[in-house]
Amino acid sequence: MSVVLDIKNLTFSYPNGDFLYKNFSLNVKKGEFVCLLGPSGSGKSTLFELICGNLKQNDGYISHKKLAQIYQDPYSSFHSTYSIISQIKDTVKRNLTKDEYLPLCEKLALDENLLYQKPHKLSGGELQRCSILRAILLNPEMLLADEPTSALDSLTQLEVLKYMLDMLSFSGILLITHDTTLAKWCADSAVRLGDL
Ligand code: ADP
Ligand code: MG
């Protein structure tokens, strides 16, 4: 199976801070669901930013295939003043036809009309499913999600995870969470940052 995220011997500290990781390695293969566990402050979101290239490591390397992200707070991952569909089109940088996105909406149990609304008209669960729709339409080989369900109620949480699991046929997933029960339920394997 092809490796879609490869982290080797990663070492990182914020300026004037302690090392969050020293020689940390992790890989995710296509079709694999890996959870990154760790208590608050252990460096999970920092790793997310390192993978996205928004921070630079002190040492080691990170490589990944085409990446899509799902963020913790769906409201902050969409602009408040534009419709959801116009923002999805902007992100995927191509013309989307209804033939392409309507079957996915059906799968995600998303009413088409919601896509033409501005984000604040939708519930957190609905908007997070729009984030998943956006991620799927990017055709990623690697899906990176930082606490994607922690702002949702437990029923919606399972729903959102189920939709993410559906993506596995064409990508690898790294789910960042502090929730060990969730990790046991959905992941093939788990890596714990606090153990390092
Ligand atoms: P987690 O997502 O696991 O809760 P974070 O990656 O957000 O952890 O933070 C890890 C540690 O790095 C924390 O101690 C946090 O205070 C510190 N930290 C996070 N962002 C910055 C920053 N921009 N500058 C300095 N320290 C930071
Ligand atoms: Mg975090």
Image (tube, grey):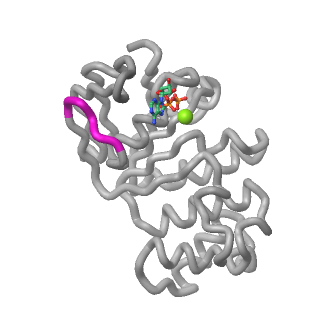
> With respect to residue 16, does 141 lie above or below?
below
Q: Quadrant of residue 85?
A: bottom right
Stretch in magenta: 55-60
Q: Residue at x 51, y 36 (%)?
A: 176
Query: Which quadrant is the N terminus positioned in?
Result: top left
Pick out the residue farthest to the front.
Answer: 16
> With respect to residue 146, does 85 lie above or below?
below
Q: Quadrant of residue 18?
A: top left
Residue 171 drawn at (x, y percent): 39, 53
Q: Is residue 46 visible?
A: yes
Residue 146 drawn at (x, y percent): 53, 42
> With respect to residue 178, does 96 lie above or below?
below
Residue 50 drawn at (x, y percent): 35, 40
Residue 101 drawn at (x, y percent): 56, 77
Left or right position of 80 against 65: right
Q: Residue at x 44, y 40 (%)?
A: 174
- Ligand 2: image quarter: top right
Q: Can residue 56 be found in the magenta stretch?
A: yes
Count the marks: 0
Q: Is residue 1 visible?
A: no
State the predominant SS element of the stretch in magenta: loop
> With respect to residue 12, does 143 lie above or below?
below
Q: Nearer the viewer, residue 116 or 34?
A: 116
Query: Which quadrant is the C terminus positioned in?
Result: top left
Q: Residue at x 61, y 64 (%)?
A: 78
Q: Nearer the viewer, residue 33 or 71?
A: 71
Q: Nearer the viewer, residue 161 or 70?
A: 70
Q: Can residue 7 be found in the magenta stretch?
A: no
Q: Nearer the viewer, residue 129 or 158?
A: 129
Q: Quadrant of residue 158?
A: top right
Q: Residue at x 75, y 48 (%)?
A: 156
